[in-house]
Every structure is written in C-alpha cells, then in structure tokens.
Image: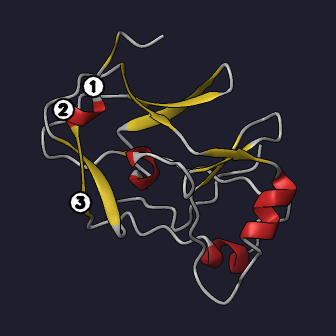
Amino acid sequence: MPNRTLNAEQYLAVRSSAIHGRGVYARREIPAGTRIIEYRGERISVDEAEARYPDDFSGPHHTFLFALEDGTIIDAAHRGNRARWINHSCRPNCETVIEDGRIWVESIRDIAAGEELSYDYNIILDARHTPAMKKHFPCVCGVPGCRGTLLGKKR
C-alpha cells in the first residue's frame, strides 16, 4: 500500500511531451511510494474493444485501452481522465497497481517538479512477439538501453 495519495488537480499537468503526443507532468515534487492517480475509463468487454479498435498494422499502435486479468478492458478514450496521457518509458518513474478491479499509478522513486510521469506499458500479446509485431508497438522513450518496443518479455 502506498504511503499517501495526492490531489491530481494540484500535482499533475497535461501538456506536450517529448516522448509522444501529450504527457503528464508533476507540478510539484512527488515522493516515492505515492499513489498518484487512478486510470479511469469506460469498462468494456474484449469483444467491444476489438469492435471499436480493429487491428490496423499499417502504422504504429496507439490506444487508451488497459486490460484487467478478469477480461475487463478500461477504455480511457471514453470517460477517461488525465492518466490516459501518461507515456511509456523503458526506465519509468511510476508503475501501475491493480487493486480491487481498479488501476492505480504509483511513483516508484521521487519525481521532481516538472518531470514527465511514465510507466512501462509491458504489453504482452497472445501472439508471438515477432520483429514485425515489435515494430507495430514501437517505443520512442529515448532512454539509454531502450528496448525499442512497448511489448514486454513473455514469461
């Protein structure tokens, strides 16, 4: 359990990101172990998610979907909050924690005022993670040692 929860309005700003599109930035210092924000959106089925967002391999993948282990999908494009703008990084300062069917973003180290928040999307597909699939899910975080994809290692 985190050591505290903060007021997102006072602590977070959404603005243009050097990583990708928009990003979420700390307005104030955020200590390690802080529950920052809940990832919110419409709860839908896998079938509904596939109907809304059919696979399109003509370009990079972009989505606001977050899957829960019970098969529920949270679609932050519908009724989502600023958490949907938190970008991926191969060297993140946050992690996601699923608790009682809710997704929380928590800091894993101190975050300085003005720093962009990020977590490792660590997407795991049922399909094989081929080189073509990795290109479909590119990482552009730019950190040293970047793995070049949003896909995580299969266990």
Q: Quadrant of the C terminus?
A: top right
Residue 109: quarter of image: top left
Quadrant in the rendering for residue 98: top right
Report which residue position mark 3 lands on: 15
Q: Nearer the viewer, residue 1 or 138?
A: 1
Give the class, few, some or many, for how many residues have Cα within 10 Å of label 2's Cα (few <14, many ≥20): few
Q: Are marks 1 and 2 in contact (CB under 8 Å)?
A: yes
- Which element is circle 1 on? loop
Task: Please give the name of the residue rendered at 72% of the width and 82% of the height, measured from the top-left corner.
Answer: 56
Specify whether 47 is left or right of 102: right
Q: Report the Cα–Cα distance between label 3 and label 1.
A: 18 Å
Secondary structure under tag 2 reads helix
Give the residue number, with chain letter if any, for mark 1.
7
**130 or 32, which is in the foreground?**
32
Distance between the alpha carbons at the discs numbered 1 and 2: 6 Å
| Residue under the image location 76 percent in, 76 percent down | 55
Q: Which residue is mark 2?
A: 10
